[in-house]
Image (cartoon, helix red, strand yellow):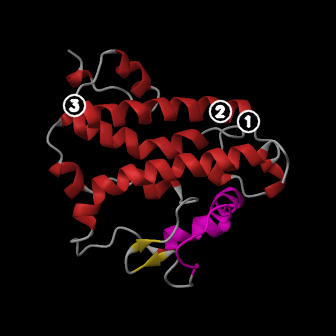
Amino acid sequence: MNAELRPILVEYAAFETAVRRQISELCAPHCSVCALVCCRPEFCRENIDSPFLKLSSSRIQQNAAYRAGHGWLTSSGCALSAGRPPVCYQFNCDKIIDALPDNLNRYLARVLSDLVPHIGKRALGDRHLAEIMDPAQLKKVKHGRFGKRLGEARNALQVIQSYKRHGFLPASARTILSKIAPFPPSLAG
């Protein structure tokens, strides 16, 4: 592994773990009683196929092993702490979204679900980090570009966490959140 990729993997896994915790808090009350299964073993395959996701997950001890036919899924949910495919973050269950109290909370949930995918965007040309299938190509990923997107995502996560604690979203937060997902005009005002 090249020296440039090592910090990217460490930072990505740590940030992904922080986002996963926030999403779990939001989703757990619904997912634990849901009869539908949004997570599917075929989604898990991306972790095995993507060199970057595989490297990310190998840096953290997982709760279970990958199993053919089940992927990373266990009776208590996904065993991956890091290295989850972007789709695992970007899927927004209607039951969860509809249960949120207002449009601002729905928007913040959307931003939260886009944070991990955002930091991997355009990592190499127009390809996401998870889409780079040649391990040799990972060496071409620039830490500066990655760091910029990670910084944007970290700032947005801090805004979301602050809103969760204080129930207030300052006007300056709109600019930060808009780097991840456009701020809805209906919320401006």
Residue positioned 41% across, 19% down in the render = 175
For label 1, the residue is 143
Residue positioned 29% across, 18% down in the render = 170
Outermost residue to the front? 165
Position above or below: 160 against 63: above
Position above or below: 45 against 5: below
Q: Quadrant of residue 78?
A: bottom left
Residue toward you, 21 or 120: 21
- Indicate which disc residue 147 carries: 2
Magenta run includes residue 62: yes
Magenta run includes residue 24: no
The answer to whether 32 appears left or right of 41 in the picture is left
Quadrant including the C terminus: top left
Disc 3 is placed on an element classified as loop
Kindly report the secondary structure that dominates the magenta region of the rendered protein: helix
Magenta residues, start to end? 42-66
Residue type at mark 1?
His
For label 3, the residue is 167
Crowd class of label 2 (few under 14; some 14 to 19; many from 20; radius 10 Å)? some
| Residue 24 on image: x %, y % | 35, 57
Of the two numbered discs 3 and 2 on the same chain, state the one appearing first in sequence: 2
Disc 1 is placed on an element classified as helix
Residue positioned 45% across, 48% down in the render = 19
| Residue 134 on image: x %, y % | 78, 57
| Residue 96 on image: x %, y % | 23, 55
Quadrant including the N terminus: bottom right
Residue type at mark 3?
Gly
Residue type at mark 2?
Gly
Alpha carbon of mark 3 to alpha carbon of mark 1: how far? 34 Å
